[in-house]
Image (spheres, rainbow, N blue to C red):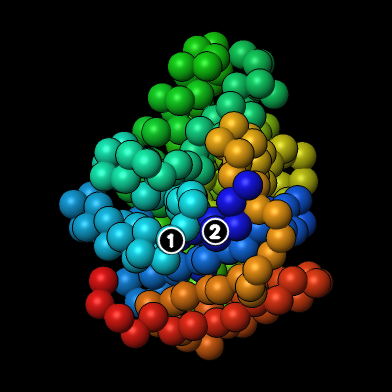
Amino acid sequence: MDNRPIGFFDSGLGGLTCIAQLMKCLPKERIIYFGDTARTPYGSKATSTIKTFSTQIADFLIQMNVKMIVIACNTVSSTCLDDLRERYPNTPILGIIKPAAQKVAKMCNKNNSIGIIGTKVTIKSKAFEELIHQLNSDLKLHSLACPALVPLIEEGIIENEIMDLTIKYYLDHFIAYHKIDTLVLGCTHYPLIRANIEKLYPDISIVNPSEEIVESIIDELSAKNLFAEKAEADNTFYASDLSENFVNMINRIFELSEFRVAFKNFDGNL
């Protein structure tokens, strides 16, 4: 047993979509989340910059004595996972891409046409394609970068025509041309617009990595006997810029939750 917190981090607020499901499944676990809202989005930045930012945040979480780090960001998972595991060999570090790749490989066959949407960096890395094809080489995969979606989501522009038009701008031709029947939400921000996507394309099956990562976390806690015996404190959410948008999005995600959360503006140096 280990009552230390689980550390999560993301380039902004998208990684929060992982937390609500985890808290339902593991109510005794304490969460420390870091959203780098001052420097978001990561998806259009150089890989060297992303690695620098990710190392700084992981260092902070290690200082907070976390028992595990979950990279709740597809961009970071696709570029920094191996580097961070090498830097912290004694701390389990999970990326968000592999569990979704395993789900796709299991649920789909050669008759499916699978679309993967994400940031420029995630799509360019081909991390999803490589992992999925390692597990099932028969699958037809098509990828598309959608760089305008994250800034809109970060601004809370979700339930309106602007978001729907932006989704259609990216996906109408992509889905029609490739005859997509399964869509992987390759960014943790995208579950926040899942309802929009399902409304516009009701016949498409959605794979949400933010849901799939929870099972991997449970497996890792079990394998290393790291489950908490009791919740010793509130879950804490740090932001490099504790903006009104960040607080509103936390409230939006946890509005139906019984769990207590505390907001903290990170005022140290990364």
Picture quadrant where residue 205 is located? top right
Q: Amino acid at mark 1?
A: Asn
Residue 34: x %, y % from top left: 45, 68
Q: Amino acid at mark 2?
A: Arg
Q: Secondary structure at mark 2?
A: loop
Would residue 34 be visible to someone looking at this image?
yes
Residue 65 is marked as 1
In the displayed structure image, the side of residue 199 where residue 143 appears, left or right = left
Label count reads 2
Mark 1 or mark 2, earlier in chain: 2
Q: Residue at x 45, y 42 (%)?
A: 92
Q: Residue at x 32, y 45 (%)?
A: 88
Q: Residue at x 71, y 60 (%)?
A: 230
Residue assigned mark 2: 4
Query: From the viewer's perspective, is residue 26 above or below residue 104?
Result: below
Viewer-proximal residue, 203 or 191?
191
Query: From the viewer's perspective, is residue 59 above or below residue 160?
Result: above
In the displayed structure image, the side of residue 220 where residue 91 appears, left or right = left
Residue 181: x %, y % from top left: 67, 32
Q: Are marks 1 and 2 in contact (CB under 8 Å)?
A: yes
Residue 265: x %, y % from top left: 44, 84
